[in-house]
Image (cartoon, grey):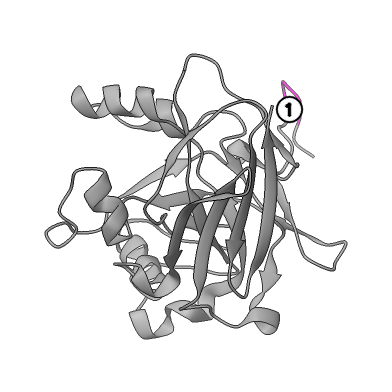
Amino acid sequence: MPDYVISPPPVVTLPIDGSDAVFPVRRVYCIGRNYAAHAIEMGHDPNREPPFFFQKNPNNLTTGESFRYPDQTSDVHHEVELIVALKSGGTNIPVDQALDHVWGYAVGLDMTRRDLQSTAKEMGRPWEIGKAFEESAPMGPLRAVADVGHPAAGLVQLTVNGVVKQTGDLNQMIWKVPEMIAYLSDYFELAAGDVIMTGTPAGVGPVVRGDVMVCHVAGVGDLTVTVV
């Protein structure tokens, strides 16, 4: 065993539906503006943009039933997403082989300090201050490909206090899951434990303490998170 000068950080894991086993997380890649209607609501033309990605940190992921409203912001937005978990990786992965690397799927949230992200955009700075904060990615349990297949169509929805705020369909993704994996592998060496957040439909908006968010991805599951 190495003689660590400090205690090593714990391995971040995601629960697996119906199992005591857990999925260790290595990296978290997030695609931006991957639903046309959401790109438009954020002021961009989805037909002219190549895909782009930012990252969250593995320890931003949380699997509890609450989301702690973060500091240094007064405008936190919900973004419901399909989550992809990889069992293997590599570089220059062909699109037609990309799904072979997927272990399973989950429902998740890309919570965003929108005011800080907007300021970063205006100043041409990275987005991490608005995206990669503590508890910014609530996650539901993973479900294996053997159980759910590879969902490519179906309802993606988020309600706040019972009112529908976001709704879309997985088939509305501009860049599909195999394309995202292949594209990322051209720029990074993907590996087992990598997680990809696949973008959010239109309807993103603010939450406040006490709000209850219910997320749904057809064929994958549901996630309920209370803002505290």
Q: Relative to 204, is 211 on the left or the right? A: right
Q: Position of residue 176 (x, y in %)?
A: 36, 72
Tell me: residue 187, above or below residue 144: above
Determine if residue 124 is in view.
no
Look at 55% across and 73% down and name the residue there.
Answer: 102
- In the picture, which quadrant includes the N terminus? top right
Most common SS among magenta residues? loop
Q: Position of residue 29 (x, y in %)?
A: 45, 51
Q: Residue furthest right?
A: 20
The residue nearer to you, when weighing 155 against 27, is: 155
Magenta-colored span: 3-7
The residue nearer to you, when weighing 207 against 13, is: 207
- In the picture, which quadrant includes the C terminus? top right
Q: Secondary structure at mark 1?
A: loop
Q: Position of residue 179 (x, y in %)?
A: 34, 72
For disc 1, the marked residue is 4
Look at 34% across and 79% down and name the residue there.
Answer: 94
Tell me: residue 26, above or below residue 127: below
Q: Relative to 61, is 164 on the left or the right? A: left
The answer to which image quadrant residue 64 occupies is: top right
Q: Position of residue 164 (x, y in %)?
A: 52, 53
Residue type, label 1? Tyr
Determine if residue 5 is in view.
yes
Look at 11% across and 59% down and name the residue there.
Answer: 48
Q: Is 120 in the magenta?
A: no
Q: Residue furthest top?
A: 72
Look at 60% across and 55% down and name the residue there.
Answer: 215
The answer to which image quadrant residue 127 occupies is: top left
Label 1: how many Cα within 10 Å (few below 14, some 14–19, many 20+):
few
Q: Relative to 23, is 104 on the left or the right? A: left
